[in-house]
Image (tube, rainbow, N blue to C red):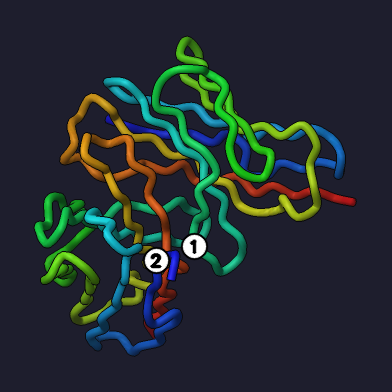
Amino acid sequence: DTGVSQNPRHKITKRGQNVTFRCDPISEHNRLYWYRQTLGQGPEFLTYFQNEAQLEKSRLLSDRFSAERPKGSFSTLEIQRTEQGDSAMYLCASSDPGLAGGSTDTQYFGPGTRLTVL
Amino acid sequence: AQSVAQPEDQVNVAEGNPLTVKCTYSVSGNPYLFWYVQYPNRGLQFLLKYITGDNLVKGSYGFEAEFNKSQTSFHLKKPSALVSDSALYFCAVRDGDYGGSQGNLIFGKGTKLSVKP
């Protein structure tokens, strides 16, 4: 496996239900990011992990959203009490900052999970 | 605040002609700039990035981009377009002076490139 994988690829749910998405990053990438993309827009940052630590959260990440990366490998994004406005493509990316750290690393994206809330 | 503008929603080019997809940015510190391509119902694929050094950056599939600090631009170019280049292109920026804990990229809205035979 050479890329970021995301499951499921598609999810249809009814308003008010909870959903959970999974992201498996490229092996040994210690940074993992979640973005949301709506139609006609570029991806918008949601949250970011370095290993198991969640270092940054966007104001877009309401209280209904929670993300975890318990062992510093795969990550899950849960949305509770879904609303129609949550319908979007949820993208995961991973990167390896190398020994130097910093912010020059390239983020590699998975295929995304498309969420439709009815 | 960081921002990226892609002023063209769509660019139409004939196959074999050169193409340019425009991007301008705003950051308070040093810009780290990226281009990604997205095919329908797919994630984003990395094309190239500018961190420092030579203003002309070469990337995947024959694409290149030119960093212009005075114009705060990072336009994507290709000398000869292919029909298979038709896709959605996104420019993104990160503030290099913010520090290593600032992980996120700021993306433009995207430009749809259509290459006709």
Q: Which residue is mark 1?
A: B43
The local secondary structure at tag 2 comes to loop
Q: Residue A100 location, x and y as percent?
A: 22, 34
Q: Is residue B11 above or below residue A89?
A: above
Q: Is residue A31 left or right of residue B78?
A: left
Looking at the picture, does residue A17 appear above or below residue B83?
below
Name the residue rendered at 38%, 74% in the picture. A6
Q: For the residue marked with disc 2, what is the amino acid?
A: Val
Instruction: Determine the residue located farthest toward the top in the rendered image.
Output: B70
Residue B26 quadrant:
top left
Label drawn at residue B78: none
Q: Amino acid at mark 1?
A: Gly
Labelled pair 2, 1 in contact (Cβ < 8 Å): yes
Disc 1 is attached to a residue of which chain?
B
- Against B37, residue A8 (above or below) is below
Say whether residue A87 is left or right of residue A40: left
Residue A57 percent coordinates (x, y): 16, 53
* Labels 2 and 1 share a subunit: no
